[in-house]
Image: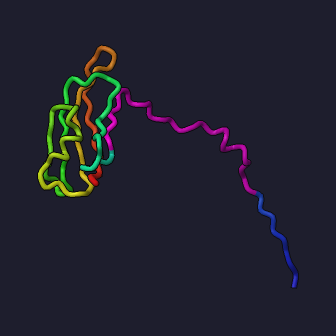
């Protein structure tokens, strides 16, 4: 029985991938809104949402997994802490939607963002 050794020449070089341009990246959004991801009734202090820019208009809503609105506020200082004052709020994951206006430079910019918050 004869054994053959097969050499396969590959048509690429190891350095070729380093020469390809990087894919374009999305520029960072100015004035992102940072919303806490978890809340608990046992917390000593409930974390507040944060934004580096001045918020001039705000509407925040929290929904159950069935789409029922559980909490709404137009006061950014009450979001998401006010959710814990909702009657019969059970532990679980809830979706939030925030529409807000911030001042970027000298111009007002309307934003809408969504996310999830876990109630422990």
**Residue 8 is covered by the magenta coloring:** no
Residue 67: x, y in percent? 16, 53
Residue 111: x, y in percent? 26, 31
Residue 46 vs residue 63, the one in the foreground: 46
Residue 111 falls left or right of residue 27: left
Residue 46 vs residue 92, the one in the foreground: 46
Q: Which residues are magenta?
A: 10-36
Residue extending farthest to the right is 2
Where residue 120 sits, quadrant-wise, is bottom left
Quadrant in which the N terminus is drawn: bottom right
Q: Main secondary structure of the magenta part?
A: loop
For the image shown, how many numbered marks are present on the structure? 0
Residue 63: x, y in percent? 18, 49
Whether residue 57 is situated above or below residue 39 in the rendered picture? above
Residue 74 vs residue 16, the one in the foreground: 74
Q: Residue at x 32, y 42 (%)?
A: 36
Q: Residue at x 72, y 53 (%)?
A: 11
Whether residue 24 is situated above or below residue 88 in the rendered picture? above
């Amino acid at each position: 029985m004869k054994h053959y050794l097969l050499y396969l020449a590959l048509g690429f070089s190891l350095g070729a991938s380093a020469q390809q341009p990087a894919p374009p990246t999305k520029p960072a959004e100015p004035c992102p809104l940072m919303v806490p991801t978890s809340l608990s009734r046992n917390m000593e202090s409930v974390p507040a949402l944060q934004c580096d820019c001045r918020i001039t208009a705000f509407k925040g809503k929290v929904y159950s997994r069935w789409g029922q609105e559980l909490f709404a506020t137009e006061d950014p200082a009450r979001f998401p802490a006010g959710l814990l004052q909702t009657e019969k709020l059970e532990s679980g994951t809830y979706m939030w939607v925030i529409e807000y206006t911030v001042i970027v430079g000298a111009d007002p910019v309307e934003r809408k963002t969504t996310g999830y918050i876990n109630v422990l």
